[in-house]
Each structure stands twice: as C-alpha cells, then as structure tokens.
Image (spheres, rainbow, N blue to C red):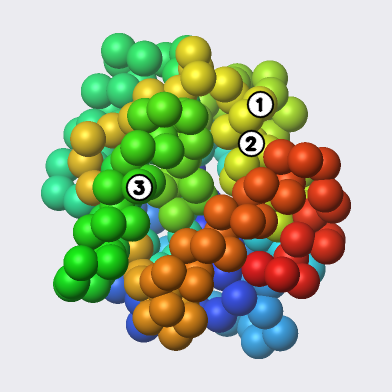
Amino acid sequence: MINIIIPTLKIDERLIELLKDLPDDVIIVNGGNQTYSLAHYNIINSNPGRGLQLATGANFAARDWLLFLHGDSKLPMGWYQQLEDHIENYPDKAMAFTLKFDDDGFFPRLLEYWVRFRCYVFSLPYGDQGLFISRSLYDQVGGYKDMALMEDVDMIRRIGRRRLKMSSLEIITSAQKYNQYGYLIRMFRNGFCLLLYKFGVSPNFIKKIY
C-alpha cells in the first residue's frame, strides 16, 4: 500500500536507526559516490540532488501511496496507524508531520514554534517534515522537480493549501546544521533563501547562499 522513499548521500547511523522503525517497502536513493547494499531494502543509485533523488525514488515506487522522508528523521509512535487513517479519511489530500528537533534549549523550541506558525499561516511545511501523498495526487501535480534547492517548497505550492493536511504527530529531525552554524544564522539564511525563491531567483544561485 505504501512505499517509503529516502534520498541520501550516505548510509550512516541516523539512517540505520530510521530503517529499524520502517517496514520493508523502502526505496533508498543514494546520490553519493559509495555503493551500498542492505538486505530487505531497495537501494537505487542516482546523481546527487534531493529533487532528482526524490523523483527517481517515486519513479521506481509501485504502491498507491508514497511517504518521502529525510534520512536523519525519526518517526513518532503511532505514525503508521495515522497513515492508514489518512488513507481512509483524506484520500484526496497530502499530509506532513509537525516538526521537532533532537535538541534542548530555547532556540530549538523557538524554531519549532516558528515552523508551526509557518505551516498554519502559509501552509508551508519543509521536506524534513515528511510528505505523505497518494500516487494519483503526486502525478497530478507533476511530482518532484530536478532542482538544485527548494524542491520541497515547489512541491508544496503545487499541492496547495486545500489539498494539504498537517499531522499533530511530531517527526524528530536532526539539529546538526543549526548547531554547526548557529540557530539564528541558519534561521535567517533559510528565510532569506525562501524570500529569494519567492521573487524568482534561480535555485542554482540560492544554493550557493544556502
């Protein structure tokens, strides 16, 4: 019923931990240089680029519903039951999870509240919140595009507010890049990149800033 698609550049400990919580219907799209082999999982080699990797995974998927995840995510308890409930009750809508960081302190909570506000007001979840979508809706909106950046924003905008539902379940994602660069700098940079994209700046140029 569901194919899970995960783009990655390497299979590391975070991805291995995520796979422990998943069924066997997982498609890993490897955009890195190293070749991997994992029992029970389909690993597809691809050129790097998250948009391209997501689209490649979807092309290989054979199920009626697709769940796109980042490799540094951790799914909440009851996630699969919610997917089944969503299929039954909202078959014409896509769904994304609420975001939570694997970090303590003021700034992680502040960013989480900002993301909830962004999703509520602008209906704009990012790729680290996962995306659950039927194959028919995915094909209808044109799927993921081969873009240097902003592929998740592009996809969500084509889905549209009326066809998107936010889950109250929290998907946990890595705060590594925020700790590496600092929360305020990373938040400002993300917002600036989104603003540039809104005004039509090329994703290729935005990636240099990101």
194 lies above or below 20 = above
User: Does dot 1 land on a helix, a strand or a loop?
Assistant: helix
The reply to whether callout 1 and callout 2 are in contact (CB within 8 Å) is yes
User: Does dot 2 land on a helix, a strand or a loop?
Assistant: helix
6 lies above or below 39 = above
C-alpha span from label 1 to label 2: 5 Å
In x, y percent, where is residue 177?
46, 76
89 lies above or below 39 = above
Mark 1 is surrounded, within 10 Å at the Cα level, by few (under 14), some (14 to 19) or many (20 or more) other residues, namely some
**Residue at (41%, 27%) from the top-left corner?**
121
The reply to whether callout 3 and callout 2 are in contact (CB within 8 Å) is no
| Residue 170 in sight from this viewpoint | yes
User: Does dot 3 land on a helix, a strand or a loop?
Assistant: helix
Q: Quadrant of the C terminus?
A: bottom right
The answer to whether 4 appears left or right of 58 in the picture is: left
Q: Amino acid at mark 1?
A: Arg
Q: Amino acid at mark 2?
A: Met
Reading the image, the residue beneath label 2 is 155
Reading the image, the residue beneath label 3 is 114
Camera-side mark, 3 or 1: 3
Q: Quadrant of the N terminus?
A: top left
Query: Toward which corner of the image does residue 45 lie, by quadrant?
Result: bottom right
In x, y percent, where is residue 83?
30, 32
Say whether disc 3 or disc 2 marks the residue closer to the N-terminus.
3
Q: Amino acid at mark 3?
A: Trp
Closer to the camera in the image, 99 or 13 = 99
| Residue 38 in sight from this viewpoint | no
**Residue at (30%, 72%) from the top-left corner?**
17
20 lies above or below 32 = above
Reading the image, the residue beneath label 1 is 158
